[in-house]
Amino acid sequence: EEFRPRQAQNIPFFGESHSKSTFVAPPQEAYGSPAPAASPDVVRTPARRLPFEGQSHYKETFVPHPPKQGEDEVRSTRSPGSSFPSPPRIPFQGASSTHEQYKPPPRSAYLQDCQR
């Protein structure tokens, strides 16, 4: 049995979404008036970024533990700039369930569809 897509029917849609039928716009007064212009006698100076001086709670309470046996080898396999080890590079061997379960229609079905 050949696969044949259904032809779309040209039936116009008449309707309204639930959102459109239930939305009530706020009254115009809710939008308020435009923001007042800044007073010309107010001079604004740009804010300076000050460096942080202090200690976080984490830095105060963190106690480093000695590395466990074998942890040094794991550290050497980490990606640059990452604190997580890189996954091992093992090639995938197997078949995906999609490739096992999905069987595409025969090539002739595509050719018939293009000739219409």
Image: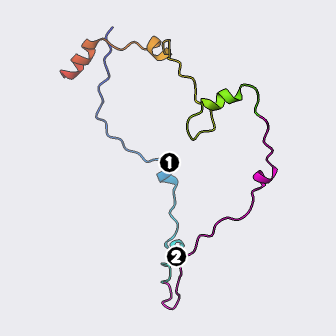
Question: Could you classify mark 1 by the number of other residues whose Cα lies within 10 Å: few (under 14), some (14-19), or many (20 or more)?
Answer: few
In this orientation, which residue lies closer to the viewer: 55 or 6? Answer: 55
Q: Quadrant of residue 86?
A: top right
Q: Is residue 63 left or right of residue 95?
A: right
* Residue 65 placement (x, y as % from top left): 79, 38
Disc 1 is placed on an element classified as: helix
The label nearer to you, 1 versus 2, is: 2
Above or below, 103 relative to 15: above
Q: Quadrant of the N terminus?
A: top left
> Which of pointers 1 and 2 lies earlier in the amino acid sequence?
1
Above or below, 40 relative to 35: below
Disc 2 is placed on an element classified as: loop
Magenta span includes 42: yes
Q: Residue at x 41, y 45 (%)?
A: 15
Q: How is the image coloured?
A: rainbow
* Residue 79 placement (x, y as % from top left): 56, 35
Q: Which mark is residue 110?
A: none
From mark 1 to mark 2, how far is it between C-alphas? 28 Å
Q: Residue at x 78, y 42 (%)?
A: 64
Q: Which mark is residue 18?
A: 1
Secondary structure of the magenta portion, mostly?
A: loop
- The residue tagged 2 is 32
**Amino acid carrying mark 2 in the image:** Gly
Q: Quadrant of residue 14?
A: top left
Magenta span includes 26: no
Q: Residue at x 71, y 29 (%)?
A: 71
**Amino acid carrying mark 1 in the image:** His
In this orientation, which residue lies closer to the viewer: 61 or 43? Answer: 61
Q: Quadrant of the C terminus?
A: top left
* Residue 34 placement (x, y as % from top left): 48, 78
Above or below, 34 relative to 80: below
Region of the chain picked out in magenta, as a range: 38-66
